[in-house]
Image (cartoon, rainbow, N blue to C red):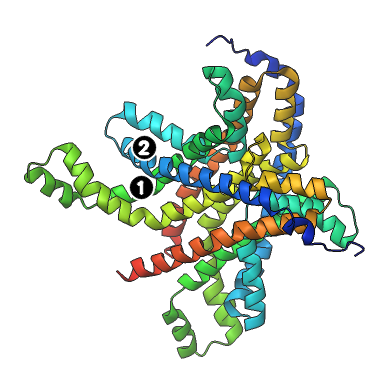
């Protein structure tokens, strides 16, 4: 191999990379919070709502789970402004797209955890004469939400990774800034490797945390 | 909205989209062939007793699982030709990049199934005088493969969706053709909607099949 690696060129760009990383983190956190809340509501409605609501929400979930996130981003960035007749900033468009995606995947997580609460618990509620609101708020939801936590954490890590796609629609996240530096310095090996390592350093401990939560926390609450 | 829908702009230009879909399907199928075979080999390495085999293979798996696929693809397309001084066609590059990613995810799926093979089965294999290779091929592989099928299919359809990323590095897949068409016709709504529906039309039935398979396996 006839090339020499020089990672020191990256020292000139630490500020730019830090800025990109901050955008990535901000976007991820915002969409995790908004998307998980959306997913919670949709998960509940899909488990209990009437047939029309269930059908419409099912269509939404399948649409976002069954198509590439890249095309969802393109759609929100280029088609939504045409339909609504309003221009959004890059950050707002990216937030809408990733929130809708996160809402779809977390709604499935909540739905599965709601289903996992056994039928006999409902029967016990009826036997104890608990009102419907207490059945849901005090018996079903706490267990379902607790069981959903490990999967929700992996959903959040997935979103962190998927957020790199916003670089393709021109938003200055970590990946976008990395690609710019790589093109300007003609040093893709050093720059892109460092960008990959930065993503890894954040995502890897989080995936470990998912395993720890799964094993320790859930055993503690024995759900 | 002032925008007049004109689906004709897309239906008159289905040729490039079909060509793109064909590239997407090639990428998906070839990456799955790599992922299903190499994933099993990698899973064996990650469950090896030898640390020198286990650690590098686990690092490989974690690296692919913990970095964005778009970073992997861009890295692969820019860095592999520079580092190894090789120049492959874009579709072949895409197949290898997606195949490596899928290998890592499938290895995780196989690992769980390999660890679920009962210890007694392997002991029985030893008692019958089977060689280690025979034990892997005739005892571990059939059970691990059978138990992994739903996850392998889910991962396989995941790579079908992720394959859209190669459009960013200029591979003429469905997403790329869609982007080009949307720009050429000034019809982003029609084009991107139809492209999205094509992706959905393929991944949805496979997803439903996986659900059915999982239900059936949970009864078995």
Q: Which residue corresponds to mark 2?
A: B42
Q: Is residue B142 above or below residue A61?
A: above
Q: Which residue is situated farthest in the left direction here?
A: B128
| Crowdedness near tag 1: few (<14), some (14–19) or many (≥20) residues, C-alpha within 10 Å | many
Q: Quadrant of residue B220?
A: bottom left
Q: Along the line of sight, which residue is nearer the eye, B198 or B168?
A: B198
Q: Is residue B185 above or below residue A133?
A: above
Q: Quadrant of residue A199?
A: top right
Q: Is residue A157 left or right of residue B156?
A: right
Tag 2 subunit: B
Q: Which mark is residue B110?
A: 1
Q: Secondary structure at mark 1?
A: helix
- Residue B178, percent from left and from top: 71, 49
Q: How many marks?
A: 2
- Residue B186, percent from left and from top: 84, 50
Label 2, label 1: how far apart the Cα atoms are: 9 Å
Q: Is residue B34 left or right of residue A10?
A: left
- Residue B73, percent from left and from top: 59, 35
Q: Is residue B68 visible?
A: no
- Name the residue at 81% across, 58% down: A80
- Name the residue at 68% across, 64% down: A38
- Name the residue at 50% across, 67% down: A113
Q: Is residue A30 left or right of residue B211?
A: right
Question: In what quadrant of the picture does the N terminus of chain B appear?
Answer: bottom right
Q: Is residue B214 visible?
A: yes
Q: Along the line of sight, which residue is nearer the eye, B118 or B144?
A: B144
């Amino acid at each position: 191999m006839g090339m020499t690696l020089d990672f020191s060129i990256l020292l000139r760009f630490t500020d730019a990379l830090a800025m990109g990383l901050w955008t990535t983190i901000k976007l991820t956190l915002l969409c995790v919070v908004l998307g998980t809340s959306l997913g919670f509501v949709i998960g509940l409605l899909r488990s209990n709502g009437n047939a029309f609501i269930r059908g419409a929400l099912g269509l939404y979930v399948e649409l976002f789970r069954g198509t590439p996130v890249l095309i969802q981003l393109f759609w929100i960035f280029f088609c939504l402004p045409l339909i609504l007749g309003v221009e959004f900033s890059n950050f707002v468009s990216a937030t809408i797209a990733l929130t809708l995606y996160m809402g779809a995947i977390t709604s499935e997580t909540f739905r599965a955890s709601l289903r996992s609460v056994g039928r006999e618990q409902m029967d016990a509620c009826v036997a104890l004469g608990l009102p419907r609101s207490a059945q849901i708020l005090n018996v079903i939801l706490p267990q379902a939400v607790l069981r959903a936590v490990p999967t929700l954490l992996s959903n959040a890590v997935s979103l962190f990774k998927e957020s790199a796609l916003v670089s393709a629609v021109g938003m200055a996240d970590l990946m976008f800034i990395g690609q710019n530096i790589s093109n300007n310095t003609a040093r893709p090996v050093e720059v892109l490797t460092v960008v990959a390592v930065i993503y890894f350093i954040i995502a890897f401990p989080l995936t470990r945390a998912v395993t720890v939560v799964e094993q320790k926390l859930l055993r503690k609450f024995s759900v | 909205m002032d925008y007049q829908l004109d689906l004709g702009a897309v239906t008159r230009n289905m040729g490039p989209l079909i060509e793109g879909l064909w590239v997407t399907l090639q990428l998906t199928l070839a990456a799955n062939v790599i992922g299903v075979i190499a994933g099993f080999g990698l899973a064996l390495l990650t469950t090896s007793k030898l640390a020198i085999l286990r650690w590098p293979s686990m690092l490989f798996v974690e690296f692919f699982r913990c970095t964005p696929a778009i970073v992997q693809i861009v890295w692969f397309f820019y860095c592999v030709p520079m580092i190894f001084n090789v120049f492959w066609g874009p579709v072949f590059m895409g197949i290898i990049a997606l195949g490596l990613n899928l290998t890592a995810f499938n290895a995780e799926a196989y690992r769980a199934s390999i660890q679920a093979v009962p210890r007694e089965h392997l002991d029985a294999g030893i008692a019958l005088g089977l060689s280690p290779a025979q034990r892997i091929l005739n005892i571990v592989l059939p059970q691990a493969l059978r138990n992994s099928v739903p996850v392998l299919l889910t991962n396989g359809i995941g790579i079908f969706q992720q394959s859209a990323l190669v459009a960013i590095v200029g591979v003429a897949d469905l997403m790329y053709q869609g982007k080009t068409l949307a720009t050429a016709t000034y019809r982003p709504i029609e084009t991107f909607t139809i492209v999205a529906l094509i992706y959905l039309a393929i991944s949805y039935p496979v997803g439903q099949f996986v659900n059915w398979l999982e239900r059936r396996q949970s009864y078995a």
